[in-house]
Image (cartoon, grey):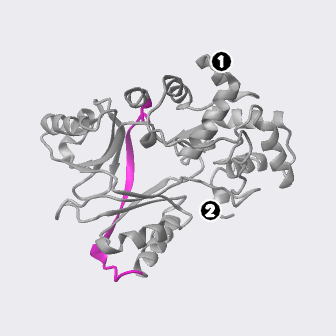
Amino acid sequence: MSEADAAGPELSALDRAVINAFQGGFPVVERPFEPAAAALRERGVDVSAAELLERVRELDEAGTLSRFGALVNAEEIGGTATLVAIHAPEDRFEEVAEAVNAHREVAHNYEREHPYLNMWFVVSVADEDRVEEVLAEIEEETGEKTYNMPKRREFRVEAKFLVDGPVSEGDVDLSYLGPDVSPTDRRTLTPDERDLVVEIQGGLPITETPYADVAAATDADTAWVVETIKRFEREGKVRRVGVVPNHYALGYTENGMTVWNVPDELVGAVGPAVASLPFVTHCYQRPRHGDVWPYNFFAMTHGRSVEESDRRIEQVRETMAEYWDVDEGDWDSLFSTRILKKTGIRLDERATANTE
């Protein structure tokens, strides 16, 4: 049995086909399950539209999927988010965590293995100036310094988690289906677009006509909803449409944040090379913080065992070594040991602040 087989052995062949095939590229048409099922049948998976719909719904209800729908790119909707680290003394760890988590602007918070910066959280705000205010409040409440690490350059954000089974390459892409729309260069949202973003941020209804249901919920026209979501895909406001697996449920329990002290002049070359590794889900350049934090490059990997994670991190190191001599002191790996908060990015305020 392979490691992928060991992840979620209770999954049927159809479950595995759904998870692999539709982590992106799901059709944006009025009845999307019909062409989606047809694409699976072309790959030897015998399933009807009704059966596919039912399996997606059951996987969602079982928690195997985090959700089904459009993955909204919060950065393109408005406002900003930043990654922050803090030292939480062992004897005050829970106290610091409680103070950090009490801020509604904190969307995610993880305990990570590091001798000093052992708590990492994301601050999401509608107004960029609010970041410094939140961090000042946290410093006053905890007595600890915060280390703000905003994204300087993004090289990859594509968290796909595949399992053994049909469509093992995860290469079904039906995003070409749907209306022929043209992207715009408009950065702000209209009131109707804001309402649409707020409605779909938590997922689409798992029904025969999800886009029509969204239209009914927002008092909009179905054709407009389909066209707007398709245009948002082209503009980058929606990263992709499909199923979003719960990677923990699939056995991807090893969440490794590898950090690297890449020579500044090489970041532009190293970034795309590391981002091309299929198991790297997030890849960014971020600022250093002196001797406390000498790293300027982040690459997130996920594995289904310690051994798999170690192999993947070694592949990242080998890729880095093609560009410069990587010493042991040039990198580190911070595994998450506990989820302290995970509410997701609240887009309501960010979208409203960016509405015309």
In the drawing, does residue 334 fall left or right of residue 179? left
In the rendered structure, the answer to whether residue 331 lies left or right of residue 281 reads: left
- Of callouts 1 and 2, the N-terminal one: 2
Mark sitting on residue 3: 2
Instruction: Give the vertical position of 80 relative to 170 (above or below).
Output: above
Residue identifier under label 1: 216
Q: Which residues are magenta?
A: 323-347
Q: Residue at x 33, y 56 (%)?
A: 152
User: Of 312 and 201, which appears nearest the observer?
Assistant: 201
Kind of residue at disc 1 = Ala
Amino acid at dot 2: Glu
Between 87 and 337, which is closer to the camera in this rendering? 87
Residue 250 coordinates in the image, percent (x, y): 60, 49
Residue 211: x and y in percent read: 68, 28
Is residue 236 magenta-colored? no
Where, by quadrant of the figure, is residue 331 drawn? bottom left
